[in-house]
Amino acid sequence: MTAAATACVVGIGETQYTRWGGISDRSELSLACEAITAACQDAGLGVERIDGVASYAYDSNDPWLLEESLGFEQLRFKGMVWGGGGGGSYAAIAQAVAAIQSGQSNYVAVFRSLCQGGGHRYGRGYEVPHGRNFLTPFGMLSPPLMLAPLAQRYKYEFGITPEQFGEVALVCRDNASRNPRAVLGGRPLTMETYLNSRIIADPLRLFDCCQENDGACALIVTSVERARDLRRKPVRILAAGQGSEPGWSSGGLGSHSMPEASYAAGAGKRLAEQLYAQAGITRDDVDTVQIYDHFTPFVLMALEAFGFCGRGEGGQFVSEGHIRWPTGRLPLNTSGGHLSEAYIHGLNLAVEGVRQLRGESTSQVAGAEICVVTCGVSAAILGA
């Protein structure tokens, strides 16, 4: 049986989103509980009925603490996807689907919680902790410094212009202007301001880089059969999974020794083909995309990897207006994305995907029925 026949999202929940360090009166555990409770309320489901949890990137919230704090009657499934940042965000959704399909769980809460004021800040410099690390001697100690060489190679190979990277930043900021939850929603961005912003790590300018934020969000995944008894119309999980080309499991954060052909290609081409086949759709069926926008160049690479344009054509694709709302044929990151809504390591993009297919987005795509959410090494396809 396919994911389309068995699993769906029936509830979404979010906390307030702030700049990193902006939430000082609650812990990451408190935020996680708040988001899961809100998602259950959205679904019309008692929180005690949650019997599975899934997260990623070494989330600090132990399942037994969630169980005690929220009063789960029985916690039968606990899933964690290894890796840093948001690479595992949609893999956590895939784990939830697997738990539902296998009968290990009836209702799985997929969540991510960040509260960086009292602890580790993800944008601060650090050494990548594994044996293939050749980055530290060259001072590549923060994500922009680690990923800039891939962006520079991509720019060099295909003649990408700063304005084409800037188009992604401007589209996300414009979408955020309609979203009351967006941290940067009240701060318009022009191309002139973008081009005059300081270089962080060439070719990445300030506005090519995502925010650092505090906040949490959650989704409730269950079977299509159980969804019939709940409040919300279910959003089907047509496909979900993880995987990447050689070298991209750690990508630029961990290694620059991947094959040259894939070095500036981003990740996701193989995964995209697998998920399209699993969902029984083609790229032409997709109405909107929510792409992991930690840095703008990787949005262009993802558009290419998922087949929305040819290799090296991402810059032209965005400059022609295809990702703009409401006129483009493939509106992108309609909540504002990580660049302008909040950086909750990918999961808030899935929340926006659900909103689109419910018809509730603040930048609603007319008649949206299929949404792709991807961070390259994991992805999901959602259907109305």
Image: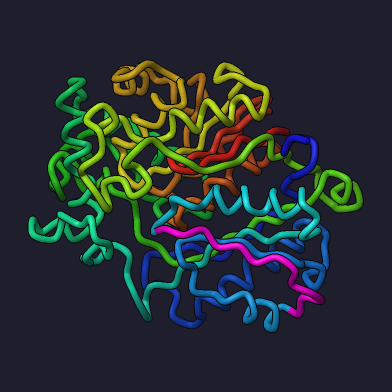
* Residue positioned 33% across, 74% down in the render: 120
Judge from the rendering whether residue 4 lies leftward or rightward of residue 27; answer left or right: right
Residue 168 coordinates in the image, percent (x, y): 35, 34
Judge from the rendering whether residue 370 lies leftward or rightward of residue 40; answer left or right: left
Q: Residue furthest left?
A: 138
* Residue positioned 51% across, 52% down in the render: 89
Asked whether 67 or 83 is in front, the reply is: 83
Reply yes or no: does residue 280 show up in magenta: no
Q: Quadrant of residue 106?
A: bottom right
State whether residue 266 is above or below residue 215. above
Asked whether 274 or 42 is in front, the reply is: 274
What main secondary structure does the magenta stretch of the protein show?
loop
Specify the quadrant that holds the N terminus: top right
Residue 250 coordinates in the image, percent (x, y): 33, 50
Asked whether 300 or 108 is in front, the reply is: 108
Residue 67 coordinates in the image, percent (x, y): 70, 78
Q: Which residues are magenta?
A: 71-83
Q: Quadrant of residue 355?
A: top right
Q: Residue furthest front?
A: 131
Judge from the rendering whether residue 46 lies leftward or rightward of residue 116; answer left or right: right
Reply yes or no: does residue 80 show up in magenta: yes
Q: Quadrant of residue 211?
A: bottom left
Residue 63 showing in the rendered view: yes
Specify the quadrant that holds the C terminus: top right
Asked whether 343 or 267 is in front, the reply is: 267
State whether residue 42 is above or below residue 315. below
Judge from the rendering whether residue 250 lies leftward or rightward of residue 2; answer left or right: left
